[in-house]
């Protein structure tokens, strides 16, 4: 990728096309080298030129956050025209719109891309992006299948691009502090980690199409079927494209558990769920996962989205049950309870920061953008995304088959 200065830069044309002539002397250098140099010629060049692939609700939120933090949101891609136009409104002035993400990746002036498409597209888009020389911020879960997750890791390590998985707890100062305490030995031996996420969702979206949609492009690698607006607006809840709230919420909790416990992959996974109580959904909103790990501990995650509604600071918890103390880790705080024979548990240490979770996403983005410039490893690397993806994909397979599944790390295969 080449940067053009002294007085400005231009978006590169497609490969093979002639570069425009300039009426002044042009200094050409590799943009990465330029960004890492201490004496920047123009302050504005510190802004990472970023494109977003998938400009639905999450994509638009990330576009706004990236822009607010200092990235130049220079391109937006979506196959649904209303999403594309909404994304362009949130992007930087002059941002280009695309309906084919591959055309966006051809723009050599783009440094990084956000992959916020439905889950079934994550791997193909991320791999294509790093092979095109782009750094990537990829929403969780990193992949929809286990082979895809390994393919992403291989592509990233071959390309040496920076890739950040969108598990923002890893960039939260609160979670970083708690993770150090959890691994310090203070809790003693930990053989059990329990977690849950409780809240309520009443129904799927009943939205209707309000503009042009390239349905076949949206389906991509998923099974072909007739246009279905319900599936399009509620893709989260269908096995072909995602794994519902079960996977969406477990992605955060399972990642945190393996991070706190220094795990890389499971030994076995079992998932049991009730029927889907959201009319039209395939994936149940009430389910439990049991995970067995080679580090000699077990973990559980329970999702209950037909429970009462909670404030977001109270709707989830991860408990590390040590032989000396227990740590309760919520979204916005933690407490450590020492072993006691008394009737009342009193925390020996606590740190509650109500309102701290939203800034964690911004911290995660800042970490990514800084790593784009320094070429350092981000806080949520692809290996962490792989460890979580293995558990999540086994979760869906177990849920649908009704069996305890074992992971064979040597063959990289799931066995029943």
Image (cartoon, helix red, strand yellow):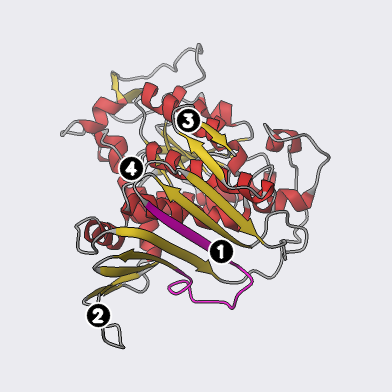
User: Of residues 320 and 8, which is closer to you in this image?
Assistant: 320
Q: Position of residue 293 (x, y in %)?
A: 41, 47
Q: Which residues are magenta?
A: 297-316
Q: Name the residue rendered at 73%, 37% in the picture.
A: 214
258 horizontally vs 225: left or right:
left
Find disc 2 in the rendering and name its residue: 340
Q: Would you say the residues marked 2 and 3 are in contact, meaning their CB atoms lie under 8 Å apart?
A: no
Find disc 4 in the rendering and name its residue: 369
Tell me the distance, in whole angstroms, between the alpha carbons under discs 2 and 4: 45 Å
Mark 2 residue crowding within 10 angstroms, few (<14) / some (14–19) / many (20+): few
Q: If the image is split into quadrants, where does the N terminus sit?
A: top left
Label 3 SS: helix
The disc label shown at residue 150, or none: 3
Mark closer to the observer (2, 1)? 2
* 126 lies above or below 283: above
State which tag comes first along the sequence, 2 or 3.
3
């Amino acid at each position: 990728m080449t940067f053009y200065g002294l007085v400005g830069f231009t978006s590169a044309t497609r490969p093979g096309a002639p570069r425009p002539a300039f009426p002044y002397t042009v200094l050409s250098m590799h943009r990465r080298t330029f960004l890492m140099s201490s004496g920047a010629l123009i302050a504005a060049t510190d802004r990472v030129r970023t494109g977003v692939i998938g400009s639905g609700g999450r994509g638009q939120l990330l576009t706004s956050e990236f822009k607010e933090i200092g990235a130049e949101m220079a391109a937006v891609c979506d196959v649904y025209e209303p999403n594309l136009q909404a994304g362009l409104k949130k992007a930087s002035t002059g941002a280009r719109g695309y309906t084919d993400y591959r055309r966006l990746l051809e723009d050599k002036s783009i440094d990084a891309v956000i992959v916020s498409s439905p889950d079934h597209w994550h791997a193909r888009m991320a791999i294509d992006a790093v092979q095109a020389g782009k750094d990537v911020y990829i929403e969780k879960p990193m992949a929809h299948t286990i082979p895809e997750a390994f393919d992403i890791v291989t592509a990233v390590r071959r390309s040496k691009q920076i890739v950040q998985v969108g598990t923002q707890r890893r960039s939260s100062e609160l979670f970083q502090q708690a993770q150090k305490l959890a691994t310090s030995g203070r809790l003693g031996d930990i053989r059990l980690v329990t977690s849950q996420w409780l809240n309520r969702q009443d129904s799927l979206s009943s939205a209707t199409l309000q503009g042009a949609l390239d349905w076949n492009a949206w389906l991509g690698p998923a099974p072909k079927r007739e246009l279905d607006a319900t599936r399009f607006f509620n893709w989260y809840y269908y096995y072909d494209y995602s794994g519902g709230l079960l996977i969406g919420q477990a992605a955060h909790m399972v990642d945190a558990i393996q991070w706190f416990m220094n795990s890389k992959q499971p030994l076995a996974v079992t998932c049991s769920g009730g029927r889907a109580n959201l009319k039209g959904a395939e994936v149940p909103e009430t389910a439990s996962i049991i995970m067995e790990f080679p580090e000699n501990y077990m973990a559980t995650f329970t999702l209950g989205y037909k429970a009462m509604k909670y404030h977001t600071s109270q709707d989830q918890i991860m408990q590390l049950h040590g032989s000396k103390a227990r740590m309760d880790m919520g979204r916005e705080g933690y407490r450590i309870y020492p072993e006691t024979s008394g009737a009342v548990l009193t925390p020996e240490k606590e740190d509650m920061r109500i309102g701290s979770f939203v800034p964690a996403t911004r911290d995660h983005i800042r970490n990514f953008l800084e790593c784009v410039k320094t070429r350092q490893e981000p806080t949520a690397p692809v290996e962490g995304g792989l460890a979580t993806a293995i558990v999540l994909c086994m979760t869906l397979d177990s849920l649908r088959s009704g069996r305890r599944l074992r992971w064979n790390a040597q063959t990289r295969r799931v066995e029943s």
